[in-house]
Amino acid sequence: MPVISVQDLNYQVGEQKILSDISFDITQGEYVALVGPNGGGKTTLIKVLLGLITQNSGKIQILGSEKKRFKKCYKIGYVPQNVSLFDSNFPLSVYETVALGLASRKPWFSFLSPKDKEMIDIALQKASITHLKEKNLSQLSGGQRQRVMIARALVSRPEVLILDEPSTGVDIVSQQKFYQFLKSLNIDYKLTIIFITHDLGVIADDVTYVLSINQKLVFSGTAQEMLSCESATELYGIKSHVVGHHCSSHAS
Ligand SMILES: Nc1ncnc2c1ncn2[C@@H]1O[C@H](COP(=O)(O)OP(=O)(O)OP(=O)(O)O)[C@@H](O)[C@H]1O
Ligand SMILES: [Mg+2]
């Protein structure tokens, strides 16, 4: 059974079509790169999946339930595109920030139970930031702050983790460490990951599946197929030396 199944999805605002006729399935344990040009509709698609906005038509199933009936929101962890909301001067410690990730699972402002504390400790460990838990967010580097946001998403033990362009503003070494970290979450915990990126070349070896969105689904398949597809590489600015392969777009 797919963890996420999308059939004939359409979303428009007024007359403007933003997502058209999109269909795909994501299986458990997959590591999916969601790519496409700026304004292509990636963030919008994620918002539809998360139930933050509602599609005009199309069928969406999340973990086997129809989206409208899906109530276990804590099973989907989400790290949004602009985490600057939690930036520098926000007076929160790492521990408190991660604890906020439990909010979808329990009433707001109730006390942390021993079970909650255990879940927070495990999330801190998974993200390798236990040693930072007393620090204020303002004392962290960009890469450390990213890990805090991941721990915050992991604390409710999601089955799917969705990240919207998490590597913006982080240097290349931190970025590579970060990708290794995501890969280890995918492998060690069999966590399904959906990762929005403009940098498919860098994570091509890690991901198991690529969806390319430009209003329509323009490509779905493996990263190797995507990178060897000349028209796709031209469209999305991804450099590849493997040419001469017929571009087989699987988009339906
Ligand atoms: N609430 C809205 N009202 C009107 N138009 C919107 C709204 N939200 C998004 N759009 C439009 O939908 C299109 C897709 O935007 P979206 O943010 O999903 O793109 P994206 O693929 O995430 O781009 P980027 O790579 O720049 O983050 C854009 O043309 C955007 O202007
Ligand atoms: Mg976006």
Image: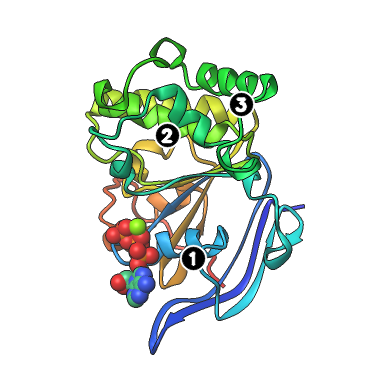
**Foreground disc of the pair 3, 2:** 3
**Looking at the image, is 221 positioned above or below residue 85?**
below
Residue situated furthest front in the rendering = 110
Other-residue count near label 1 (Cα within 10 Å), few / some / many at <14 / 14–19 / ≥20: some
Q: Quadrant of residue 87?
A: top left
Give x and y (percent) for residue 150.
46, 33
Residue drawn at point x = 58 percent, y = 31 percent: 155
Residues tagged 3 and 2 counted as in contact (Cβ below 8 A):
no
For mark 1, what is the residue?
Answer: 249
Instruction: Label 1: state its secondary structure.
Output: loop
Give x and y (percent) for residue 91.
31, 30
- Tell me which numbered mark, 1 or 3, is placed earlier along the sequence: 3
Question: Where ligand 1 lies, by quadrant?
Answer: bottom left
Q: Amino acid at mark 3?
A: Leu
Instruction: Label 2: state its secondary structure.
Output: helix
Q: CA distance from mark 1 to mark 3?
A: 49 Å
Q: Amino acid at mark 2?
A: Met
Number of dots carrying numbers: 3
For mark 2, what is the residue?
Answer: 149
Does the image show residue 40?
A: no
Q: Quadrant of residue 60?
A: bottom right
Instruction: Label 3: state its secondary structure.
Output: loop
For mark 3, what is the residue?
Answer: 112
Quarter of the picture containing the C terminus is bottom right
In the image, taking residue 106 as reference, residue 85 lies left or right, namely: left
Residue drawn at point x = 38 percent, y = 50 percent: 227
Residue situated furthest bottom in the rendering = 15
In the image, taking residue 186 as reference, residue 179 lies left or right, namely: left
